Structure formats: C-alpha cells, structure tokens
Amino acid sequence: MRLPSSLRIKSSREFAQLRAEGKSYPGRYLVLSVLPGAGAHRFHFGLITSRKVGGAVMRNKIRRRLREVIRAHQERIIEGCHLVLIARWRSPEAEFAELEKDWLRLAKRAEILKTPNHP
C-alpha cells in the first residue's frame, strides 16, 4: 500500500513554517522536525535529502527507505501533526533497520506515536 500524495508536504511555505514553529530532534542518521496539532485530520510529512547525502541515485534510495518507514508506522502516528525527516550525511551507510530504529527513537522522543492502548 502506497502513501497517498495528499499526505506529503510539498510547498516551501509549509517547510518554512515547520522550521520556524516546530521542534527538531537530531538522531544519528536523521533529524525529525515536528509541528504538533497543525489542524489536519491525518499527519503530513516531508522528506529532505540534500546533496551531502550523495548523488541522485543515493538520495532517491534514502527517500524510498524513509517513505517505507513512515508507511509501515503510519497507523501509530498521531493525527494532525506535521513532520519532516531530514537525512543526515551518514544515512547512506545505514541499513533499512538502522534507519527505522533511529526514526522510532526520534518519534518516541517527539511523542508523535500513539500508545498501544490509545484509540
């Protein structure tokens, strides 16, 4: 199952708002920026992979992995939050499981995951 395009943050205005008003959580391979309660019924996400990560092939590979991490855990992300994942220069050396583990750790720190007994 693919993530719908409607969940993606695409405009530079939304990225700028999240950067100005949101909170960032740095990890080993990723930086997670979160703006909770942005008013949407579902979460919205954006991905940033700069040229520091590598060439176009590597950046696309990292984006695919990050989209899969979000897709796998989309049911656990609280409604209404906006989040941006920024790939750090170390991310190409990470396996998928390491990226997922780093994301889960950052998401728990940011408190954007539902608890198991949360409706």
Image (cartoon, rainbow, N blue to C red):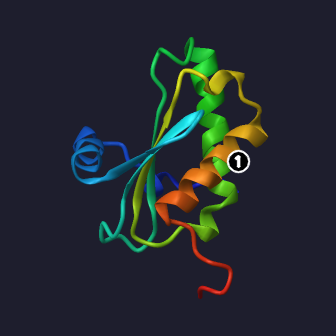
Q: Is residue 54 above or below residue 45?
A: above
Residue at 27% from the left image edge and 48% from the top image edge? 14
**Is 111 drawn above or below residue 118 in the view shown?**
above
x then y, percent, for residue 3: 59, 54
Residue under the point 62% across and 27% down: 91
Please tell me how many numbered marks the rendered image carries: 1
Residue pictured at 66% horizontal, 61% vertical: 73
Quarter residue 90 falls in: top right
Amino acid carrying label 1: it is: Lys
Callout 1 secondary element = helix
**x, y (%) of residue 81?**
40, 64
> In the image, 74: left or right of 34?
right
Dot 1: few (<14), some (14–19), or many (≥20) neighbours within 10 Å?
some
Q: Nearer the viewer, residue 2 or 95?
A: 95
| 18 relative to 69 in the view: left or right | left
Image: 85 above or below 108: above
> Where is residue 115 drawn, in percent x and y?
62, 78
Quarter holding the C terminus?
Answer: bottom right
The furthest residue to the top: 55
Closer to us: 30 or 64: 30
Task: Give the percent coordinates (x, y) of residue 39.
Answer: 30, 71
Between residue 108 and residue 3, name the one nearer to us. Answer: 108
Residue at point 66% right, 49% down? 69
Q: In the displayed structure, would residue 96 be above or below residue 37?
A: above
Q: Quadrant of residue 98?
A: top right
Q: Quadrant location of residue 46?
A: top left
For the N terminus, the quadrant is bottom right
**Dot 1 corresponds to which residue?**
101
Left or right of 81 in this view: 22: left
